[in-house]
Image (spheres, rainbow, N blue to C red):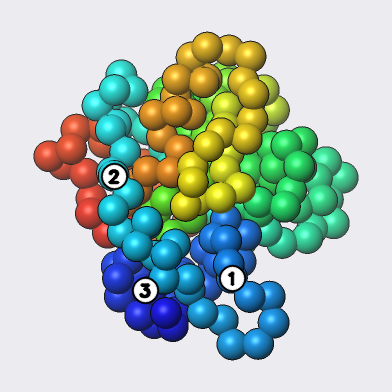
Amino acid sequence: MTTGQAGTALGCSIPTVKKLMATGVIPGVRGQGRQVFPLAALQQLQVRPAADLTALGPAEVAVLRSDAPAKVDEPDREWIGFGAALNEAQLLAALSGWWRCDPARVAAGGVLPVTVAGFVVAVLTGLTGWESDGTVGTAARFRFPKARLAGYLTDLTAPANVADPAVPEDARLASLLLGTRLASVSGGPIAYVTTNPTTDTADEGE
């Protein structure tokens, strides 16, 4: 399938499809030449269920809308974004900050699903405590140094948790969320979604 056909089938834009392919979670994607979306993978993603947010507890959770991995020159991490080829330590560092957000609001949800193209590819917990980059006002960025990587995927078509969480609740949350569809809308990397399905926003908008 072309990326345009895949986007139509999944309800997202061509750039969003290409971003999903660039994360490495879709098997069968060619690294060279014209990019095509494997039909078998597309068929599996089309029937993926929506995340059951009612099982989370809080009335609202934050969602990290991630990009494909990109190299950065920062003292505490080599990468930002989500990539299946990153190891667990690299991935945790890449996903645990720095974002423009309301850190107390993020922490209150107790869990942070990470999505690419509206699919949950990783789950962060341990969001108690945060650090600011020192910027004042709405431009301030925050990270969560105690965050744990409760789970992540390397193959979205066969969603199995690659991490081995030591905390039973982390394992439960990862099992509940990984591989599901979770729509969100935001002008930045962090979105907030209600856990009441009657009021969830139904457009990933990436």
Judging from the image, what secondary structure is the residue with disc 1 in?
loop
Q: Earlier in the sequence, mark 3 or mark 2?
A: 3
**Horizontal and vertical percent for residue 111?**
46, 27
Residue 59 in which image quadrant = top left
Q: Nearer the viewer, residue 105 or 175?
A: 175
Name the residue located 56 percent from the left edge and 33 percent from the top edge. Answer: 161
* Circle 3 or circle 1, nearest the eye: 1
Q: Which residue is mark 3?
A: 7
Tag of residue 151: none
Q: Earlier in the sequence, mark 3 or mark 1?
A: 3
Mark 1 nearby-residue class (10 Å; few <14, some 14–19, many ≥20): some
Q: Is residue 27 left or right of residue 64?
A: right
Look at the picture and state if 199 lies above or below 117.
above
Name the residue located 56 percent from the left edge and 81 percent from the top edge. Answer: 35
Amino acid under label 2?
A: Pro
**Horizontal and vertical percent for residue 64?**
49, 45
Amino acid under label 3?
A: Gly
Instruction: Quote the CA–CA distance across marks 3 and 2.
Output: 18 Å
Judging from the image, what secondary structure is the residue with disc 3 in?
helix
Look at the image and tell me in which quarter the N terminus lies.
Answer: bottom left
Q: Is residue 93 visible?
A: no
Look at the picture and state if 70 lies above or below 56.
below
In contact (CB < 8 Å): disc 1 and disc 2: no
Q: Which residue is mark 1?
A: 29
Q: Nearer the viewer, residue 160 or 148?
A: 160
Q: Is residue 165 left or right of residue 47?
A: right
Name the residue located 59 percent from the left edge and 70 percent from the top edge. Answer: 29
Instruction: Quote the CA–CA distance across marks 3 and 1.
Output: 15 Å
